[in-house]
Image (tube, rainbow, N blue to C red):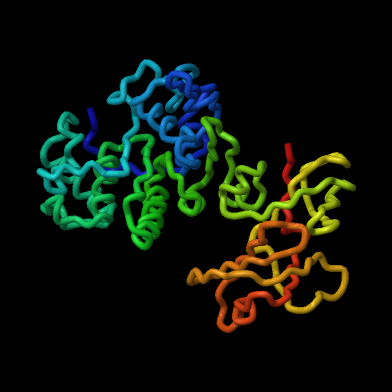
């Protein structure tokens, strides 16, 4: 039974609303999820990110009750879910295909899950009007499903889930069917909606940029395992493994060996870049084999040898790719088969010289640009 009070707006707090405790899911010999243990905080926008087949959707479906764990337990608001069927869980789900009923208008679609709510007709209509205002579709209630755009269908699917006032909203790649411009617009609206309501959102995506844009925290998954959980900034600037560094954005990797490590600086010998120094918090022993990783936008190209004791390497300009707001340049450097990727913003007149293949160029970087990762 649902009460007739207006749609609730929750205040952010920091206790766990979802807790995965050693959760595994096997399909025959396939380990879809392998010993997942982590918490999601109340009011958090939390994303599960990874390539296809990594287990993220299976994890989401176990929260919804559509799949049961092979072992372990999922707690929702402190209650174990193994004994709760899907319709008894304080969650609702938005699917990628939206599942809009073609024979119902917008109001009918939104009200579909409220047929047994116990609300009077007037209270239900009031609740529908509230969510239509919330999703920025006031006055659209009488429109048929075939009169809605892709973005409007997505909003209606959100409204149908939110009208039941769930403690957790589950979203399974809900923006995947939209074109790029509309998807970016809906990302902003989805984030604003979550912040306005304070409801916990558990979001599944394989799109790294989407996860970085929307999330308070992200769990990166691969082959059923949760590899790392951190904020978008932490995952991008200070990843803990080569997989995470390479999956979140783009990274240039160079093999190296640690030659010195002080309290706040590490020195690494590399075959390609020579000896490099990095500011790094993690301690690697002398002799450890590591990856020196540098993001494409952290390189600074120059067309004459930099003066002074500056980390740099000489290379030769290769092909380039114009991407609108930025350009990618590929630079060939000695002792490396693959070119180095350099990314720069397209400022007026700043890229003309870089677009000339075969000319010499020096790539500079700073100590803080380097991420050091274990190589094992």
Residue 207 screen position, x and y as percent: 46, 49
Picture quarter with the C terminus: top right
Residue 97 screen position, x and y as percent: 28, 44
Query: How many callouts does the rendering have?
Result: 0
Look at 73% across and 74% down and name the residue there: 361
In the picture, measured across the screen, residue 288 lies left or right of residue 7, that is right
Residue 348, compared with residue 14, is above or below; it is below
Residue 105, compared with residue 365, is above or below; it is above
- Judging depth in this view, the residue of 186 and 297 nearest the camera is 297
In the picture, measured across the screen, residue 374 lies left or right of residue 1, that is right
Residue 141, compared with residue 50, is above or below; it is below
Residue 359 screen position, x and y as percent: 70, 77
In the picture, measured across the screen, residue 332 lies left or right of residue 43, that is right
In the picture, measured across the screen, residue 273 lies left or right of residue 34, that is right
Quadrant for residue 317, please give it: bottom right
- Judging depth in this view, the residue of 239 and 46 nearest the camera is 239
Look at 29% across and 42% down and name the residue there: 162
Picture quarter with the N terminus: top left
Look at 37% across and 63% down and name the residue there: 181
Quadrant for residue 118, please give it: top left
């Amino acid at each position: 039974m649902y009460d007739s009070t207006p749609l609730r707006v929750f205040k952010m707090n920091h206790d766990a609303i979802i807790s995965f405790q050693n959760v595994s899911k096997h399909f025959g010999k396939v380990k879809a999820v392998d010993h997942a243990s982590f918490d999601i905080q109340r009011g958090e926008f939390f994303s599960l990110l990874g390539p296809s087949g990594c287990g993220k959707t299976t994890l989401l479906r176990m929260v919804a009750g559509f799949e049961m764990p092979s072992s372990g337990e999922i707690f929702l608001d402190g209650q174990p879910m193994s004994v709760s069927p899907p319709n008894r869980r304080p969650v609702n789900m938005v699917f990628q295909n939206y599942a809009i009923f073609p024979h119902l208008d917008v109001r009918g679609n939104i009200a579909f899950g409220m047929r047994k709510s116990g609300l009077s007709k007037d209270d239900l209509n009031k609740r529908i009007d509230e969510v239509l205002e919330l999703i920025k579709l006031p006055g659209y209630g009488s429109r048929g499903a075939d009169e809605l755009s892709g973005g409007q269908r997505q909003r209606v699917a959100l409204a149908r889930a939110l009208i039941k006032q769930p403690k957790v909203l589950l979203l399974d790649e809900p923006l995947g069917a939209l074109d790029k411009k509309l998807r970016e617009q809906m990302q902003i609206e989805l984030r604003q909606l979550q912040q306005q309501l304070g409801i916990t959102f558990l979001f599944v995506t394989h799109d790294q940029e989407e996860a970085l844009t929307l999330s308070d925290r992200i769990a990166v998954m691969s082959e059923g395992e949760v590899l790392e959980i951190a904020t978008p900034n932490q995952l991008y600037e200070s990843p803990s493994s080569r997989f995470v560094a390479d999956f979140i954005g783009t990274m240039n990797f160079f093999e190296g060996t640690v030659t010195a490590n002080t309290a706040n600086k590490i020195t690494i010998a590399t075959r390609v870049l020579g000896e490099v120094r990095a500011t790094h918090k993690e301690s690697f022993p002398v002799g450890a084999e590591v990856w020196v990783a540098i993001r494409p936008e952290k390189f600074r190209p120059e067309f004459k040898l930099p003066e002074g004791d500056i980390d740099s390497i000489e290379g030769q300009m290769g092909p380039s790719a114009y991407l609108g707001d930025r350009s990618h340049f590929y630079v060939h450097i000695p002792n490396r088969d693959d070119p180095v990727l350099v990314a720069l913003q397209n400022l007026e007149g700043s890229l003309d010289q870089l677009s000339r293949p075969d000319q010499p160029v020096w790539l500079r970087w700073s100590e803080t640009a380097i991420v050091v990762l274990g190589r094992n």
